């Protein structure tokens, strides 16, 4: 066989091998993608979204507490037959009931011809003993002007709350679970931004706990 024909034949075989390798890589990639998609689809089917749980809480006293599942849709009902007005915070809603899906601290003021009622309810997820807001707005509008955590069934002893700025300067400290930070340090309002908190507390059963995280001061 002539040398030129032999070289062409050898080159053709090399090209065929390269094409076959490329084809095999594409097939393997397609199979990998398909198996990954099937596995992900099966995993999604194995863990369906929990059905919502509907519940209603009658809000008729100060300092109430509700322990909810994360898939709970909760109605807070403060209906009083003779009421002339309602005001819910947060949200500034004026209806007798509100529906919530998230943990939080909720307040309602109810006005009747003869009396004013002020009720509060702390809603936390199952297994938690506190709700810690992630922001506040100390702008003197009487709405969310201070910041503090809200606890359920903790001891008033061995409680310490500290708030620090980004330079690790301690801006606020208290041993009173009901005392809130007004966003000031030595009488001066701190700038908008993120601050760090540390909370040490003791449960009714005597267990010591520590929580820490970031909070946002919004102006």
Image (spheres, grey):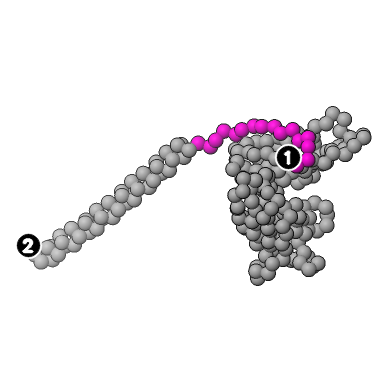
Q: Which mark is residue 64?
A: 1
Residue at the image position 72 percent from the left and 66 percent from the top:
171
Q: Going by the picture, which residue comes out furthest to the right?
A: 114
At numbered mark 1, what does the secondary structure look like: helix, strand or loop? strand
Tell me the CA gap for discs 2 and 1. 98 Å
Neighbours of disc 2 within 10 Å: few (<14), some (14-19), many (20+): few
Say which quadrant the C terminus sits in: bottom right
Q: Give the image location of residue 174, x and y in percent.
A: 73, 59
Residue at the image position 68 percent from the left and 55 percent from the top:
159
Say which quadrant the N terminus sits in: bottom left
The majority secondary structure of the magenta stretch comes to: loop
Of 86 and 125, nearer the camera is 125
Judge whether residue 134 can be spotted in this image. Answer: no
Judge whether residue 36 can be spotted in this image. Answer: yes
Residue bounds of the magenta highlight: 48-63
* Magenta segment includes 179: no
The residue wearing badge 2 is: 1
At numbered mark 2, what does the secondary structure look like: helix, strand or loop? loop
Of 132 and 75, nearer the camera is 132
Q: Please report whichever mark, 2 or 1, sits nearer to the chain's N-terminal start.
A: 2
Q: Which mark is residue 183?
A: none
* Magenta segment includes 55: yes
- Reply above or below: 85 against 135: above
Q: Give the image location of residue 162, x and y in percent.
A: 68, 61
- Reply above or below: 70 against 14: above
Answer with left or right where residue 105 lies relative to residue 6.
right
Q: Give the image location of residue 141, x and y in percent.
A: 83, 54
Of 167 and 40, nearer the camera is 167
- Reply above or below: 118 against 186: above
Q: Give the image location of residue 113, x and y in percent.
A: 92, 34
Q: Nearer the viewer, mark 2 or mark 1?
A: 1
Residue 195 is drawn in which quadrant? bottom right
């Amino acid at each position: 066989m002539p040398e030129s024909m032999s070289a062409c034949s050898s080159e053709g075989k090399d090209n065929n091998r390269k094409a076959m390798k490329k084809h095999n890589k594409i097939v393997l990639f397609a199979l990998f993608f398909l198996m990954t998609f099937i596995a992900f689809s099966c995993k999604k089917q194995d863990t369906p979204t929990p059905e919502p749980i509907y519940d209603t809480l009658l809000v008729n006293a100060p300092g109430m507490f509700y322990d909810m599942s994360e898939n709970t849709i909760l109605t807070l009902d403060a209906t009083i037959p003779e009421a002339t007005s309602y005001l819910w915070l947060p949200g500034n809603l004026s209806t007798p009931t509100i529906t919530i899906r998230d943990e939080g601290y909720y307040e309602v003021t109810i006005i009747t011809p003869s009396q004013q009622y002020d009720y509060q309810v702390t809603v936390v997820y199952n297994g938690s003993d506190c709700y810690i807001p992630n922001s506040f707005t100390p702008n003197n509008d009487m709405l969310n002007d201070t910041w503090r955590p809200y606890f359920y069934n903790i001891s008033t002893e061995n409680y310490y709350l500290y708030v620090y700025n980004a330079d690790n300067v301690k801006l606020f400290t208290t041993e009173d679970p009901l005392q809130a930070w007004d966003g000031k340090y030595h009488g001066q309002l701190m700038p908008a931004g993120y601050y760090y908190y540390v909370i040490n507390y003791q449960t009714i059963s005597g267990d010591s706990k520590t929580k820490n995280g970031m909070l946002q001061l919004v102006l």
